[in-house]
Amino acid sequence: MRVLLMTAMMLCACLSVPGCTGGDEEFFCEDAVTLTQYEWYECEFIGSDWTHLSIEMTSTGDSPVHIFTVKESAYDNWMNCGHSFSDPEFTGINSTGASMEGEIEKDHFYVLFDHPNSCDEEDASTPVVEISFKVVAS
């Protein structure tokens, strides 16, 4: 009886955890934010076996936003305003709306929504960026 009860408990526990039965897992990052000149928003994905990435973004204002997808090892390069750090398939420069979807083979990466002037000198006339987005990794 104990074995049967323990088996039933393990089965219930496994079925309540995404991916336990071998099914696909989906991880979401979704929000609506306002970015000033030196602000950004990041979605971090840590795990393994990512095969698909979907990014949807809309701007509710007149200002565009940069979308970058960077692997963990390139994150510091982006933070220091470096170059050649993002995956070109999942990059949008000066975008007011984007829909990107495709295959990805990274186990730790970031999707970044960056104010276009974040590496420029501070300028009080720089407009804010208002966006809403949804990122899905599976």
Image: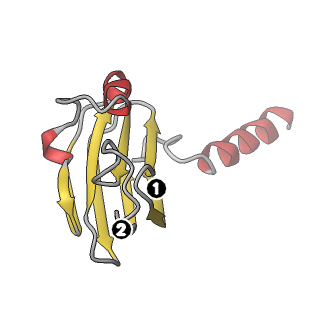
Instruction: Characterize the local packing of mark 2: few (<14), some (14-19) or many (20 or more) Cα atoms within 10 angstroms.
Output: some
Residue 2: image x %, image y %? 86, 34
Marked residue nearer the N-terminal end (1 or 2): 1
Distance Cα–Cα, label 1 vs label 2: 25 Å
Query: Helix or strand or loop: what does disc 1 sit on?
Result: strand
Which residue is painted at 26% across and 53% down in the image? 66
Query: Helix or strand or loop: what does disc 2 sit on?
Result: loop
Residue 119's mark?
none
Residue 3: image x %, image y %? 79, 32
Which amino acid type corresponds to the residue marked 2 in the rendered image? Pro
Residue 127's mark?
2
Is residue 102 at all visible to an observer of this figure?
no
Left or right of 100 on screen, residue 7: right
Tell me the quarter of the picture where residue 136 sits: bottom left
Q: Which of marks 1 and 2 is in front?
A: 2
Which residue is painted at 25% across and 28% down in the image? 82
Rendered-image quadrant of the N terminus: top right
Which amino acid type corresponds to the residue marked 1 in the rendered image? Cys
Residue 29's mark?
1
Left or right of 104 on screen, residue 80: right
Location of residue 62 with respect to 83 vertically, above or below: below
Asked whether 115 or 121 is in front, the reply is 121
Location of residue 73 with respect to 99 vertically, above or below: above
